[in-house]
Image (cartoon, grey):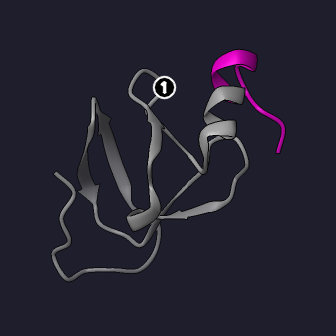
Amino acid sequence: MLTRNGQSGGEARLHYLDGDIEVLEPGDYVTCAVTGRKIPIAALRYWSVDHQEAYIDAAAAASRMVNGKGAA
């Protein structure tokens, strides 16, 4: 489960699981694999377990799954 331990700042390193996330290195955000935009950890809703990537929204996730890599 995603928890905060008081450390913040910078990009987090996460391990994406089915319906959950494991924090490898804490941070404030992750980067969308399709758009390159920063996703605040609290707003992270879309990711791929197979690709171990985060997505800013459903459209970015769908683009990645259909096209292999979406347009920025």
Crowd around label 1: few <14 · some 14–19 · many ≥20 (10 Å)? few
> In front here: 27 or 41?
41
Q: Quadrant of the C terminus?
A: top right
Residue in view at x 69 percent, y 41 percent: 34
Reply above or below: 25 against 10: above
Dot 1 amino acid type:
His
Number of marks in picture: 1
In the rendered image, the vertical position of residue 14 relative to residue 48, given as above or below: below
- Residue 9 located left or right of residue 62: left
- In the displayed orientation, state which residue is furthest to the front: 58
The picture places residue 3, in percent across and down from the top left corner, at 18, 64
Residue 71 counted in the magenta span: yes
- In the image, taking residue 49 as reference, residue 21 lies left or right, namely left
Residue 69 lies in the magenta-colored region: yes
* Span of residues in magenta: 64-72
Residue carrying label 1: 51
At 68% from the left edge and 39% from the top edge, which residue is drawn? 60
Q: Position of residue 2 (x, y in %)?
A: 22, 57
